[in-house]
Amino acid sequence: MSSGALARLEAEWARCRWVWNECVAMSRKVHAHNKATGEKKTCGPVQLAAMLTEARRSMTWLREGACVPQQQIIRDFGKSRAKALGDIKARLPVRQRAGMPGIKRKREADPSLEYTRRGFRLKNDRLLLANGIALTVAWSRDLPSAPSSVRVYRDSLGHWYASFVVAAPSEAPAETGRAIGIDWGVKEVATTTSDTHDLPHAQHGKTAAAKLVRHQRMMARRRTPKNRPDTAGYLKARKAAAKVSKKLARQRQDTGRKWAKAIVRDFDVIAVEDFRPKFPAKSTMARKAADAAIGATKAALVEMARKHGRTLYLVHPAHTTMDCAQCGARAKHALPLSMRTYTCTACGAVSPRDKNSARVMLVRAGLNPAGADLVSPAPC
């Protein structure tokens, strides 16, 4: 990217960041007014768009920027605020709610600009944005159709990306007539009813822990007092830590996607535990579970199943370790984590604990787990 294009992008982001912060201030002002007077004034995208029109009319600095990304930043603010209000109305626990949108500070917020169809075009493999910004793109793949919008953003390492929204056709592989049940765990990230498709714990986080801790300690030593500019040493340590974290996230994402691709290629129907890990990593078990990246792997599986037209069932995880996949009987007490073999007191079936849970997924999805391996028959 040329220095001129980089300067223009950063100037566009400065204007969009100002628009976002004005939306936050106006929203807080209206909320305080309604709370004090009992009125029900609104501060939605329509009112904020009118505020933007008036601001562009009176401010030359703001009018010098393109109106498309400024309008899109208002829409992003509206979506973020609506999500937070919806979680509050649904009475979700505080730790599960989306926070209300806050101020974007220059030192903390990474640039993110969205352009709709009338704000960009592609010409000779170059991305031409509104306001005369021309970018040379290193294409990772060919676009399957004409894009409807593009988001240009910068990550924590300072690298710029362009993410296009296109209509991609569903790629349905050949039907196999097979079904699979999947249970999430720690020693094995995913235990399935097929032995060849189990996903072992790659321990990417454990491998990168030493490097990450070293750079984080350097950041702590070089941290500057609040409201003072960061030193060159602190910025260098922060970039090194961000590089390790980015590589770790990409390794986990790559492992999850490759495994999900194999699952949707070999099975038509997938029954997976709808596990939503939300816990602080204060214990060894919790840290191992966080390193397993169950959430990212599950998201990759859901995305891959939708892309390839496979049927996927999300099974509620309650009592999946207590039910017997053979007869459906439920144990009277929860099994401790140290007990890795499940023995049914009703029918006498013996099975590895996680394999039994994987077969329970198939049962709860209305499928027949007959023919599953590693189950000894009940004694006569």
Image (spheres, grey):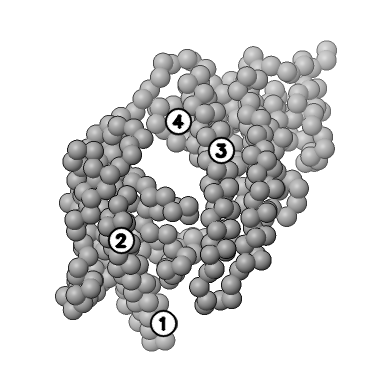
| Residue closest to the far bottom | 37
The amino acid sitting under disc 3 is Gln
The amino acid sitting under disc 2 is Ala
Q: Is residue 358 left or right of residue 74?
A: right
Disc assigned to residue 167:
none
Which residue matches tag 3?
251
Q: Residues within 10 Å of mark 3 (few under 14, many from 20)?
A: some
Q: What separation in Å lies between label 1 and label 2 (alpha carbons)?
A: 38 Å
**Residue displayed at 20% across by 42% down:** 122
- Percent from the top left, x then y, of residue 199? 63, 29
Mark 1 or 2: in front is 2
Which residue matches tag 1?
32
Q: Which comes sooner in the sequence, label 1 or label 4? A: 1
**Residue displayed at 56% across by 33% down:** 255
Which residue matches tag 2?
7
**Residue displayed at 33% across by 67% down:** 14
Q: Which comes sooner in the sequence, label 3 or label 4? A: 3
On the image, which quarter does residue 26 sit in?
A: bottom left
**Residue displayed at 24% across by 68% down:** 49
Q: Which comes sooner in the sequence, label 4 or label 2? A: 2
Q: Does any portion of residue 206 appear in the rendered image? A: yes
Q: Is residue 243 above or below residue 146?
A: below
Q: Does any portion of residue 269 appear in the rendered image? A: no
Assign a secondary structure to mark 1: helix
On the image, which quarter does residue 353 sit in?
A: top right
Q: Nearer the viewer, residue 163 or 363?
A: 163
The amino acid sitting under disc 1 is Ala
